[in-house]
Image (cartoon, grey):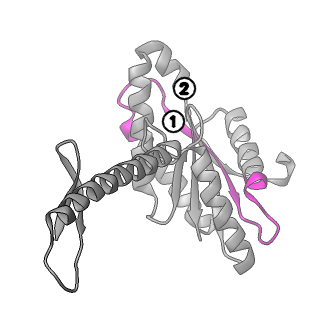
Amino acid sequence: MQQACRIGEQINGELIVERSHGAWLDEDSDLLCRLADHVAIAIEQSAQHLELERLSLTDSLTGLANRRAFEGEIGRRIASLGRSGGQGVLMVIDLDNFKTLNDSFGHAAGDRALAMLGTMLTTATRGHDVVARIGGDEFAIWLDGCTQSGAERVAMTLRQNIAAQAVIDMGLSLSIGMAALRGPGDDLTALFKRADAALYRVKRAGRDGAQWFEQEDA
């Protein structure tokens, strides 16, 4: 015997019950209907919980991971890479002149620029990399297993792409700070500190560039 699980008119599942002998009675059908109602409610609550969890880890504007999701995922990856001696690069990226864009053309234009950048970052990276929006106009990329030369190619591609996409003549560009995983004992907090230091050096030099962390940045 089978019974659809419904919330209102919406079917969200199906309950199937078998018995080894004897005929189904009317009271069996009534019981199955009541049970299907309970199952439908449980399925709906589970789906709502999963959706709330997804939303708590997703940036609503770009659809990218948010800072919480990024830190959780990359923290786990770094711990694993530290044990295996693997490679990885953290990029911290700022959209230059974003405030000027917002002030001159409004927040809707700013939102479009951020969404465009989110798509651009995802397109320029690989499926196993992780891209996140971690602040207003600040993004982060984890390039999994990537060498320094590979990261430099990604940074160059991103800077070229933003220049080609910046149809509004507001001087939009990217400032990028990069830090490579150093091995066992390194962690995401230290990587962010190094990548941020490299990013600030780019900004002090006039923006629109990409730099690695150097010891004098510490």
Residue at the spot x=57%, y=50% of the render? 69
The quadrant in which the N terminus is found is bottom left
Q: Residues within 10 Å of mark 1 (few under 14, many from 20)?
A: many
Q: Residue furthest bottom?
A: 20
Whole-percent x, y for residue 46 in the image: 41, 53
Mark 1 = which residue?
A: 173
**What's the residue at 71%, 68% (across, down)?**
79
Q: Is residue 190 above or below residue 113?
A: below
**Based on the displayed image, in which of its 4 quarters is residue 28 positioned?**
bottom left
Q: Where is residue 61 shown, x and y percent of the image? A: 43, 35
Q: Indicate the secondary structure of the residue bearing disc 1.
A: strand
Disc 2 marks which residue? 97
Residue 169 seen by the camera: no
C-beta proximity under 8 Å, tags 1 and 2: yes
| Residue 49 visible somewhere in the drawing | yes
The amino acid marked with disc number 2 is Asn
Label 1, label 2: how far apart the Cα atoms are: 8 Å
